[in-house]
Image (spheres, rainbow, N blue to C red):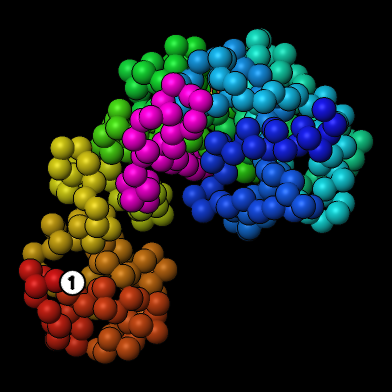
Amino acid sequence: MNVLEKANVLGYAGRYDSCGPKACEVEVNGGLGGIYYAKAEHKTCRLFKTLMDNNCAFDCKYCPNAHGCSTKKASYKPEELAGLFDYLHKQLKVDGLFLSSGIAGDPDKITERMIEAVSLLRGKYGFNGYVHFKVLPGTSYELIKQASELATRLSINIEAPNKAVLNELTSCKDYKIDILRRQAWISRFDLAGGQTTQMIINDLATDKDILRMVDWEYRNLNLSRVYFAAFRPVKGTPLENAEPGSLVRQNRLYNVDFLLRAYGYKIKEFDLVMGAGMLPRQDPKLALAQATFESPLDINEASFDELIRVPGVGPKTARKIVESKVKITKYEQLHELGGWVKRAKPFIEVGGKRQAMLDEF
Ligand code: SF4
């Protein structure tokens, strides 16, 4: 198999790792797979997303690369991958690398090859851009440390919110030792792009289970981001006939994740709007405001913490309102400060006016 054939097999095999909530694949050079538009360090870039090797001895039931699945197999030598990436980078086709791998045997052996490929990129080819390096479950501390010195971002996929759910998906990964312990090690390293992880969204766990674990990860392991991936059944895997995960659910989890990280909401607040541990289908911020606002808020008297709980008002607008030296007496002023007036109206009082009753919204 030549390098371009390997690029297509391993680029296709790598598509199940999320590299961003809105990442989408782009085709270049007459169909070379594995290139994605994704957000990296606050800017959109084209990531070359690939596996080093898609041979795997693990039995993850959702994965087409798992042991026993009949997917076409391929494996890069470190120099092949580094040389191909350098070629694509010099052709201005890609800006960064997202590198993961199947685990054919000892995770340290495959990680050594991944490290060698990235070392070549950094040294021989002088690439100093974005590298997202997937830590494989069970990799030794010493190798994770070496990877942290080469990569912009490290991640290990947690996949599930607890051990019981992970055990339903695979018999090969120990939740505490292979995943959480490795995440704790990664959290000790200084990485420009921080540490991220990915959680599969399926019927085995409630939103409450997922969000509790996400919150724990942010607080205890200092994660930069958690990515959610609605489960997609893949032909040829043991779960090929299972129901796909809901994209609406995935989006709601992203909404709450953003409210936790950017707005400072507390996870317990969402208990109010969860029925049987599941978020409502509507926007969680709106649902929470409808459940908690007893009367419209006087926008000129409200604190920052109160204002960011108003639908249509984000942290930037709330900050501008609080710091404004001029009283807000018209909806137009709120609009000028970046507020979404139509959404905010039922929850605020502006210039003595209440546009609509809360229960009419
Ligand atoms: S470890 Fe699991 S998810 Fe990763 S490649 Fe192997 S089977 Fe797939």
Percent coordinates x, y for residue 224 in the rendering? 51, 42
Residue drawn at (34%, 22%), measured in percent from left and top? 165
Residue drawn at (17%, 79%), measured in percent from left and top? 349
Residue drawn at (18%, 44%), measured in percent from left and top? 274
Q: Give the camera-side residue of 297 and 290.
A: 290
Q: Residues within 10 Å of mark 1 (few under 14, many from 20)?
A: many
Is 150 located above or below residue 272 in the figure? above
Is 327 located above or below residue 357 in the figure? below
How many labels were placed on the picture?
Answer: 1
Amino acid at circle 1: Phe
Q: Give the camera-side residue of 249 and 7.
A: 7
Residue 190 visible in the current orientation: no
Is 183 located above or below residue 252 in the figure? above
Magenta highlight on residue 242: yes
Percent coordinates x, y for residue 199 in the rendering? 43, 34
The furthest residue to the right: 124
Return the residue at label 1: 347
Residue drawn at (76%, 37%), measured in percent from left and top? 7
